[in-house]
Amino acid sequence: LKQLALQLPSLPEEVKELYELHYPQTTFPRKVTLLQALNSVIDRFSRVFILIDALDECQDERNRAYFLGLIRDLAPWINTLVTSRPIALIEDSFKRCLREEIRTPEEDIRNYVESEIASEKFVLGRQLSSVPDLRASIIDGIVTKAQGMFLHAQFHVNHLATKHNVRSLCEALRDLPKSSGEIFRKAMGRLTSQNPEAVHLAEKTLLWIVNASRPLRVKEIQHVLAVQKGDVDSDEHALTAPSYILSLCAGLVAIDERSGICRLVHYTAQDFFTENRARYSPWGHVGMASTCLQYL
């Protein structure tokens, strides 16, 4: 509504009334009222296109269902392009629409793997540059196991990057996982093989991201990690650098540059940790409550 309204020479009365009614009380308009205002703006354009990227990343099913309802109600007046991973609820909502499956081109994944192998993060990178056949087989192996998914390629590269000799590298290459669940288990294996302090920080980061009732900003995660037993005041010098937090989490965590939200790298990671809560965070909410009480 805002994006469309800003393109008009003047705001429609319906939009002004919405603002004057809800902004002072910090309330949100009902669906029918919002649709009326949106339709009044859409009517002022000859054609309207709405692009919705990564609808699957809206993990709250109620919010997603509400949003899908809005799209259906607006369908007669707009052209919509939606991108999403294959999720049954979303697929059912668009089953009468034109669909196109998009996969990452193999060449793009290959270029990414080649650049990562040549980087400093890959322990055997220099050695592999002098053995082109082995280097080629490693690249082919990662590309094949990635199955067109860039995320899988990233985890495979991270898994192989730490190998210190050719034999262990080849063994790990043969044992690369195919499913997302296997990939996340391997990542957790790398995470827990770090020194105890690093493991503690990484596991606490994941605990909060997975179990929090809302998305957390990186500043909030920093303060969570800074809390220790016996603290009587917050200490800015105890905050861990965001880049270091990411380096500890084995590729499982990402920070959105625009919003500053600290999140799991993909919705399938949320599914994995939710399904395996008994293994990875059996007392998660107890630990979170303890940290909150200490912080207060």
Image: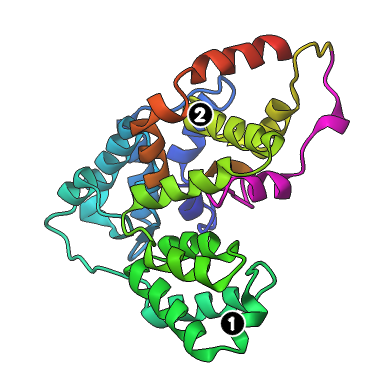
Give the residues drawn in magenta, as a range: 233-260
SS for dot 1 = helix
Which of the two labelled residues, at mark 1 and mark 2, occupies the earlier sequence position? 1
Judged left or right of residue 257, residue 182 is left
- CA–CA distance between discs 1 and 2? 44 Å
| Kind of residue at badge 2 | Arg
In front: 34, or 105?
105
> Residue sitting at 45 percent across and 27 percent down?
28
User: Quarter of the image holding residue 34?
Assistant: top left
In front: 140, or 238?
140
Q: Decide if residue 266 is in sight here.
A: no
Magenta includes 245? yes
* Residue that mark 1 sits on: 128
Judged left or right of residue 92, residue 126 is right
User: Image quadrant for the C terminus?
Assistant: top right
Residue 193: x %, y % from top left: 59, 44
| Kind of residue at badge 1 | Leu
> Residue sitting at 41 percent across and 83 percent down?
107
SS for dot 2 = loop
